[in-house]
Image: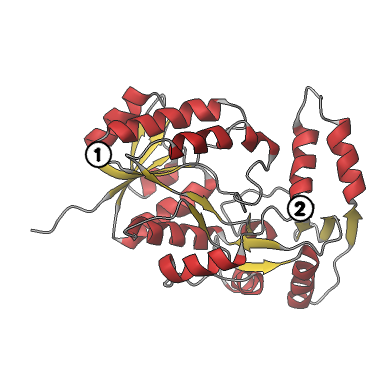
Amino acid sequence: MSSPRPVIALAGVGNLGRYICEELVASAHFDVVVLSRGTPRKWLQDLQVSVFVTDYTTPSILSILSSTRATTLVSFINITTPAYITVHAAILDACRQSKSCQRLIPSEWIGDVETHPRKPDFYATTRLPFRDMLRAQEEVEWTLFNMGWLADYFLPEGKSYMPGIKDEFPVDVDGWKACIRGSGDELQSWTSARDVARAVVELCRADEWDQVTYVAGEWNTFNGAIKVIESLYGRSMPVTYKTWSEIRNALTAHAHDEDTSALELAQVEEMMVMGCLACPKEKTARQRTNFFKDVAFRDLRTLLSDAKEMEGVL
């Protein structure tokens, strides 16, 4: 009789989580359960994934982990306030008390968190304290998973589960325009959401984890990305630039706004100029060899070519 497959629990599944859920189900190595505050989404029902309603308190999470015998919990709960700590502390406590769930990937999903541990700014009051909590315990193995920009933001509408962020992301293929922050020559990295998902599957199969994990489909600049896009589409893209001085002025001008949207945009723009989402090349390459040698990470040219040739979501 074959042994039961390990169970991966996904918390707060959204758009990136959908890719990871699909790839875990498709892998045949794992069973998947989802923790959610509300009614299951139709696509989860279509995948025949079990959904457990939780209030994200320790007893509620522990009950689900115990009943499903989950071995790993992956969180996509992106909260910009200290409530992030409350929820993830409950998740960590439940894992520590669980007899089966001894692995945790908390919600990070950003860039170079070792060189820029406090970026974006709200990470200083949310992720930093929780990282200290992770380091202070030994029962649960954990890793902070990061991939730079999601390359899906370069894709035309309808080609990704990721919704467009056209005011934030520099390149708008559908509107055929770009607004580059800084010079546009600052190094960035990006990875397609589907490739991120396939990497997470491989990481769940690994015997041991590093405390920080990076993947990247490509390192390039936004000026370089525009050249790739123009060559594939055969036409020039209008480009404007927002200077570092303008971004600094926006950070100051909106520092105390009641509506934080303008400040948050300026903080993301600051990260572009600082290169915060460029995953460290040497460590990323080493981890690709150690963990992800079976994942075919796509660069931007390949991803855009796939989008032109393939129907539906990539």
Residue in the foreground of this view, choosing between 138 and 15: 138
What secondary structure is marked by label 1? helix
Task: Give the quadrant of the N terminus.
Answer: bottom left
Front tag of 1 and 2: 2
**Above-or-below relation of 137 to 314:** above
What secondary structure is marked by label 2? helix
Q: Name the residue rendered at 28%, 59% in the picture.
A: 29
Which amino acid lies under the numbered mark 2 shown in the image of this protein? Met
Q: How far apart, in angstroms, are the residues tagged by discs 1 and 2?
A: 43 Å
For the image shown, how many numbered marks are present on the structure?
Answer: 2
**Above-or-below relation of 314 to 165:** below
Which amino acid lies under the numbered mark 1 shown in the image of this protein? Thr
Q: Name the residue rendered at 80%, 41% in the picture.
A: 266
Task: Give the quadrant of the C terminus.
Answer: bottom right
Q: Which residue is mark 1?
A: 68
The answer to which of marks 1 and 2 sits earlier in the sequence is 1
Question: Which disc, if any, is residue 274?
Answer: 2
Q: Position of residue 307 (x, y in %)?
A: 61, 68
Marks 1 and 2 in Cβ contact (< 8 Å): no
Q: Quadrant of residue 2?
A: bottom left
